[in-house]
Image (cartoon, rainbow, N blue to C red):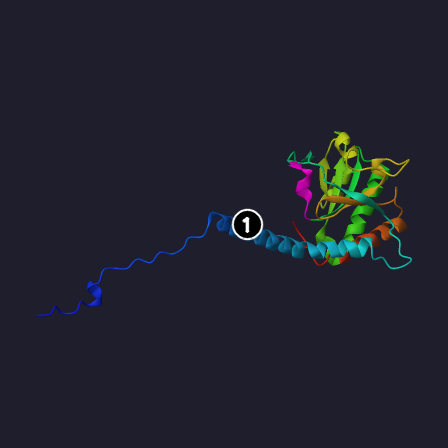
Amino acid sequence: MQDAPRSKSQHPLGMTVYELPSPTDVVQADSKRTAMGRLRMLLVLLVCAAPVVASYFTYYVVRPEGRRNFGDLIEPVRALPDVKAQGLNGDVLSLPSLKGQWLLISVGGGNCQADCQHQLYLQRQILASLGKDRARTDWVWLVSDSADIPNSILPGLKEATVLRVSADALAQWLQPAEGQQLQDHLYLVDPHGQWMMRFPAKLSTEGALKAKRDIERLLRAAASWDEAGR
């Protein structure tokens, strides 16, 4: 009697041997993936940075014939120094924490007399006249000594960020025009924390209007990437 044919399930299992990749191939494949990942990251960074680069290129390089800045452009720009400042309420913060807004800065001693008060007045008026763009700017007064601020001017500083910073730290960051002093100018810092413009010393009302026009042009040039608020 012949044995019945075995079913497929009764046959022993076969083993298939697959060829494993060589260590060299594995390393090359990993290197390729790493390189592609870095390239993609670089492309993403370039796309994100493009509006910023374009706005500054437009303002600094592609200037209509005959147009001049009223303020002096600072080249190269100077980053906010990593130094401590103290508010009128005693709170301590670092200057780089002011990033995220355009900063119109004045400098002076606490015993703010007529010239200092006039500077603060023009500073406030320049920013107030920006209309809807006012929200993208901050009014900053850096007090370079420990003198008491007159009570008479405190009500007018409610919208200002008033910080005490050592004179030495300010002198290593800001620089007046030749023959002038730090307190004679207004200084403009961009939202990245870069000091990039200095307005002429001892502004008149007419000079303040010209400074405002410079600021408006910069705000328009940066409109594609700059947003109000930190």
Quadrant position of residue 154:
top right
Residue 48 visible within the image: yes
Q: How many marks?
A: 1
Q: Write the residue at 49% across / 50% down.
A: 26
Instruction: Give the image location of residue 87, x and y in percent.
Output: 68, 36
Q: Nearer the viewer, residue 176 or 136?
A: 176
For this view, does 98 lie left or right of residue 60?
Answer: left
- Residue 217 shows up from this direction: no
Q: Nearer the viewer, residue 97 or 116?
A: 97
The quadrant of the image that shows the N terminus is bottom left
Q: Is residue 99 a member of the stretch shown in magenta?
A: yes
Residue type highlighted by circle 1: Ser
Which residue is more in the foreground, 41 or 216? 41
- Please identify the residue farthest to the left as the structure is shown: 1
Residue under numbered circle 1: 31
Instruction: Please identify the quarter of the rendering in which residue 96 is found.
Output: top right
Reply above or below: 155 against 67: above
Residue 49 occupies quadrant:
bottom right
The residue under the point 66% across, 57% down is 47
> Which residue does the image show at 52% across and 52% down from the upper left?
29
Dot 1 falls on a residue whose secondary structure is helix
Report the side of 131 relative to 1 (left or right): right
Which region of the structure is painted magenta? 93-100
Answer whether residue 216 is magenta in the image.
no
Where residue 147 sits in the image (x, y, percent)? 76, 29
Task: Give left or right: position of 67 versus 161.
Answer: right
- Position in image of residue 77 (x %, y %): 77, 43
> Where does residue 91 sit, x and y in percent of width and height?
64, 35
Label 1 neighbourhood size at 10 Å, few (<14), some (14-19), many (20+)? few
Residue located farthest toward the front when viewing the structure as drawn: 1
